[in-house]
Image: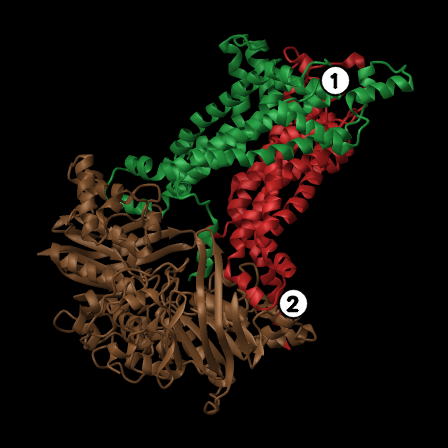
Amino acid sequence: MLRFIGRRLLVMIPVLLGVLIIVYALSCFMPGDPVINKLGTQNYTQEQYDAMEHQLGLDQPFVVRLGSYLWGVVTRLDLGESYATNRPVTESLAQRVGVSIQLGLMSLCLAGILGIPIGIFSAVRQNTIPDYTITTLSIILASLPGFWLAMEAILIFSAKLQILPASGLTSWKHYIMPVVCASMMTLASLVRMTRSSMLEVIRQDYIRTARSKGMKETRVIFKHALKNALIPVITVLGNQVGMVVGGSIIIETIFNIPGMGSLMLSAINQRDYPVIMGVTLVTSVFVCICNLVVDIVYSLVDPQIRSQFVSGKKRGGKEKTEKEAAA
Amino acid sequence: MNAQKNSGSMEKLRKSSQWKDVWIRLRRNKLAMVGMVIAVLLALMAIFAPVIAPYDYQVQSIAERLQMPSAQHLMGTDNMGRDILSRLIYGGRISLLVSLLAVIVSLVIGGLLGAVSGYMGGKVDAVIMRLMDILMAIPGILMAVCISAALGGGVWQTALAIAVAGIAGVCRLVRGQTLTLRNQEYIEAARASGSGTLRILLSNIIPNCLAPIIVNTTMSIGGNIMMISALSFVGLGVQPPIPEWGAILNSGREYVSTFWPLITFPGIAIALTMFGFNVFGDGLRDALDPKLKQ
Amino acid sequence: MKVLEIKDLVIEYQTMDGTVHAVNNINLDLEEGETLGLVGETGAGKTTTALGVLRLIPDPPGVIKSGQILLKGKDIMSMSGEELRAMRGDEISMIFQDPMTALNPVLTVGEQIAEIYFLHNECSRAESMEKAREMLEMVGIPGERADEYPHQFSGGMKQRVVIAIALACQPALIIADEPTTALDVTIQAQVLDMMKNLKDQLETAMLLITHDLGVVAEVCDKVAIMYAGEIVEYGTLEHIFNHTMHPYTMGLFNSLPSLDKDADRLRPIHGLMPDPTDLPSGCPFHPRCPYARPECAESHPELRDYGNGHLARCLFCDGQLGAENTAEEEKPAMAAATEKEQTLDVLLEAVHLKKYFQTRGGLLHAVDDISFTIERGKTLGVVGESGCGKSTLGRALIGLNEATDGQVLFEGQDVTHLKGRERRKFLTNMQMIFQDPFSSLDPRKTVFEQIAAPLRINKVCRNKRELEQRVADLMETVGLARRLTYSYPHELDGGRRQRIGVARALALEPKFIVCDEPVSALDVSIQAQVLNLLQDLQAAKNLTYIFITHDLSVVRHISDDIMVMYVGCMVEKCASHELFDYPLHPYTKGMLSAVPIPSINMEKKRIIMQGELTSPVNPKPGCRFANRCPYATDECRSVQPAVEEVRPNHFVACHHVREINGL
C-alpha cells in the first residue's frame, strides 16, 4: 500500500510540472507590462525600463526564465515575489491557503455526507413520491450556479432576515452560507450519480443471488449493493474536487473571505503573474492530493484493485490482453 | 421496375427510422420536452433579440436607474438605468454564441485526441493521457480564468478559454468509448474487410460514440453558459458594454442588500438555461440508450 | 412425497410493447430426490418459471397472474415476506447461469457462503465461517481460499462456490438455471459430476433448466419441454428420448449435430420462436411445425396423457402426424456443385506459427509453434477449451493479430506480414465470420451497409446500381429476405444477424473463410440453419473453411479434418471420423468422454480430468497437459513433446502416445 502511495506521489510530479509550464506560458501572453506596472508611472526612461526588466529577469529568453522559475520552485519552494507587493508569493499564499482549503474540504464533505445517503434512499424508493421529489430537486439544484446562490443567500438571509452574516469568516455562522452554496451543485450531482449507480447495481445477478439466499432487503442493500454502487460514485467525487475548489474560490470573493480567491482576482487585475501561478499551483496540488485520497478509498472498496497493489501490478492491462488472446 | 422504386422509398423510410425511434422515446419524456422547449426558446430569443427586446440594451438613463419591475420595465432597470429585460435578452445571445463556439472547439479537439488515444493505444495514448492529466489537475474555472486573463476579453477569446477547460472531459469520454468499441468484433470485421485506421475511426468508431457525445455536448452548452457567467462575474470574459448575464449579476453586487432585480433575474436566466440543457441532455441519454430499447 | 408442485402457473410481464405471456399454465411436480429437466430455447419461459418458484420475479414489470406453487404442501403464493425469506436459501436455493456475475465482487467467497448459516441457522460469525470452509472443501476447493475474492477464482471454481452457497443449508429443492452452460466441456463434466454426487448425498430434489439435451440425458429423471411459455411434452427420460411425441421435441433432436454419426445435413426447425406479446392462434408451434394442418391454427391443444405419465400437447401426436409437410423446406441456396475435386491441392499452410502477447504477468504464449496445411475445398475444425488460443490462431492466419514468428502461406505466397494495399488485396481471398452475431455487426449500419462495406472499401463495384445488385445477390445467397435490406441489426434475431456476417464474408468472393465460433451464440434450431447454410455454400463455391469451435458435435458434423488445441499448442490432428473413433492423445480422450451425449441408450465411460488449464503466461517447459494427465511422467514435465505422425495422417504431440494406445 505504501509503495502504491509512493508511486502515485511520483506520478504527481510530472503533472504538477506540466501545470507550472502551462500556467507560466499563459502568463507570458497576458496583456499589460509588468515592468511598467512595477515602475508605477508612465514617465520613465529607457534605462530605467531596462534596469527594471533586468531586475525582474524578463530580458532573458522564455526557456531560461521558465527554467529558473521551475528550479526555484523545485529546490526552494520559491514561487517568486509578487510584483505588486514585493513580498514572496509563498508568504501571501501561506496566509490564505488554509482558509480556502478549509472551505473546499467542508463543501466536499457536506456534499458527500448528504449526497450519498440521499441518493441511496432515492434509489431504494424508486418510483415513489419521495424519489420523484428528490430527483426533481436534484435536477433543479444541479442547475443553480454557486455564485448566484451565494448572492441570493445574502439577499435573503443577511439583508432581509438578518440571521446570517454576509461577509468575513470569524464565527461558525460565517461558514454556513459559503459552504452550502459551494457544495450544492456537487451535492445534486452526487445524489443523481449515487441513485443511478445503485439502480444499476440492484439489477445485477449477484443481487439476485443475495435475494435468493433469503435475506432482508436492507441487508441486500447495505451488505451487497452499497459497496459496489459506491465505486463509480467515488470516481465522480474525485472528478468533482476541481469543480468544488474552483467554485468556492469564486464564492469566497462574494463573501469577502480572505482566501486565495480574492488574492487571485486582485492578482489578475494587477497582472501579478507570480501570484496567479502560485494560486493555480497550490490549487492543483490540492486537487491532486484529493485524487490520491480518492484512489486509496477506491482500492479499499474494490478488492480487485486492492489485490493488484499487493502483487504490484497495475490494473487493466493484463486482463485485456488475455481476453484478446482467449475466447 | 416497381420493386426498385419500392426499395428506394423504403430506403428513405428506413434511414430515418433510428432517429425516429429516438425522437419517439424522447417525446414520451415530459421533462426532456420541457428542456427542449427552453433550449429552443432561448435560441429563438438569441436570434430575434432586436425584434423582441423592448429597449436598446445600451441606452442609459441615469434618471431611471434602479427601478423596480413595472409595466414599462418588466424586470426593472439597472444601475445605469438600462432595461434589465432587454439586456438579458441580448445577453442570452452572447452566452449562447460563446457557449456553442466553445462546445464545438472542445468537441473537435477533445474528440479527435480521445479517439486517436483510445484507438491507437500504446505510447500515443500514454502521451495524450498524461497531457490530459495535467489539464484535469487545474480546476476548469481557474484554467478559464488564466486563459481569459492572458488572451483578454472578447467573444473568441472567451470561447477559447472555455473550450480549453472542456477539452480534457471530452477527450476522456471519447477515449473510454473508443476503448470499449475497439474490442468489439465489428471493428475487427472492418479490419478483416481491409479498412484502414482512418476509415475505421471515421466510419465505425465515431458514429458509435455519437450518443454519449451528443448527450455530453448538450449538457456542456448549459455548463459553459454558467462558466461564461462566472468569468464575467469576476470581471473577465466578454467585456462591457456587451451585456452578459454574469456581468449583469456582477453589477448587482453593490446593491446586493438593496436592489434584488439585478441579482435575481440574471440568476434565473442562467439557472433556467442550465436546467433546460441538463434535463434535455438527461432525456437524450435515456432516449439514445440502446439498453432501453427492449 | 412431493417436494414441489406447480399448478396452472401464469406469469406475465407488462412492457411498453404489450403483455408478454412468459409462462402460460404450467403444471409440474417434483418428488424428493428427483431431478426434473426443464428444456427449451431462449425465450421459452424457463428462467421465469424458476424465478416464479422463489417469488423473485421482478415486479414491476412481472406479475404472477394465477396458479399455485406448493413447497412440501405449503403454499408459496400466500407466504408473507418473512416466511418467503426464511424459505429462500434454506428450503429452496438457486444456482444461476453465469458464475462470473452471480457472485458479489466485493465480498470474499467465504463471507458469501457463511451468510447462509448466519441468516438461517443463527450461527455466530465464526461458526458460519467454519461451516463455509467445510462447504468449500465439499465442492473441491481448499478451505483456506475462503478469504479470497471472486475475481481470484476461475469460472469453474466460481460455479463451485455458487453451488456451495446453494447446498449450504441442505435445501429440499435446488433450482439450477443452466449451471454449466458458461463452462468448458471438461470443467462442465467435473461440475456435473460433483453436482450429481452431492445431490444424491443430500437427497435434494433438483429442477434443472437447460437447453442442452446432452446434460439432460446425463442427470435428469424426468423432462419437461417448454415452448412459448407452455409445456409441450413431459415424461421420463425414456419417454422423451426414445418415444418422442411432440413435433417440437423431434425438431430439437433433429437440429442437433451428432457426435457418433455423420449426418450430411441437419434438419432444423424453420422460423423463429413466436413473439411472446403476440402468440399465434391455436397451437403456438404450428407456424413452424412440419406436420401442421389447418386445425392446428384453430384449436389450442391440451396437454394430454398418452400413458404412464407421458404428456404431450399436440392434436395429432398419437400416431396421426402423417407425412412431413416439406413445402417449407428451405432450399439449399444453390444447387450443390459436383463432387469435391479429388486433387491434393494445398490452399493454406501455417509453418511454425507463433503469436505471443506481452502482458504485465509475462509473455502470453497464445499460439505456440503450430504447423498445418489445409486443402482447397476442405474444412479444418479447430477445437479446444476457452483460452487455448484457437481464436488467436484464426486471427493470426488472417492477419488481424500479426504473427510473432512463423509463416502463413496462401497458395504458396507468404502472407504473414502484409501491409496496406497488398494486405487489402490479399484479404479478398480470405475472410472471417465472427462469433458473436450481436457484437460483430455495427449497430448503426443497415444490413445493406454491412454487406456493402467490403465491396466499397475494395472498390469492387463500378457504380451504385452494380453495388445494389451485388448486395441483393449476396442476401439471396445467404437466405435473407429483400425486405430486410434497410433493417438495423437490433431489429433482427441472432440467426439472421449471423447470415449477415456470412454475406459480408462472402462479399469479396474469398477462397478461404475463418469461421470463429459462428454458431455458438445461437439456439440449436437456428444453429442448424446456419450450419446448413455454411455447408451449402462450401459445396457451391468450393470454399475452404477453418472452423473454430468448442463444440465437439458441431466440429464433427462440419469438418473434414480436426485439430485439437491445448494451451497454445496443437496436441492432435487427424481426419474427423478418425479423431472420434480412435482418439490418441489423453487430452482428446478426456475431452471426448466429457461431452454429454443427448441419448440414453449408450453406456459410456467417463474420464473426469481433474484440475484446470495451465496458464499460457510464461509456460513451464514440458507438456502443457502434464498437470492433468493421468499418464504424465518426469519426461512429460520437463520436455515438450514434438508433433509426430503416429498413424497415416494422424498427428499427435505426446511422449507416451504409443504405450497408452498400445501401438
Number of numbered discs on residues = 2
The residue shown at (53%, 51%) is: B179
The residue shown at (66%, 22%) is: A79
x, y percent for residue B224 = 65, 34
Chain B drawing hue: red
The type of residue carrying mark 1 is Tyr
In this picture the colour scheme is: by chain
**Residue tagged 2:** C420
Q: Quadrant of residue B199?
A: bottom right
Q: Which residue occupies the foreground of this view, A257 or C234? A: A257
C659 over C129 or under it: above or below? below
Q: Which residue occupies the foreground of this view, A323 or B286? A: A323
Chain drawn in brown: C
The answer to whether residue B75 of the structure is visible from this angle is: no
Quadrant assignment for the C terminus of chain B: bottom left
x, y percent for residue C445 = 57, 62
Q: Give the numbered dot on residue A83.
A: 1
Horizontal side of residue C239 vs B146, given as left or right: left
Chain name for mark 2: C
Q: Secondary structure at mark 1?
A: loop
Mark 1 Cα within 10 Å, few/some/many (few <14, many 20+)?
many
Horizontal side of residue A174 vs C248, given as left or right: right
Chain A drawing hue: green
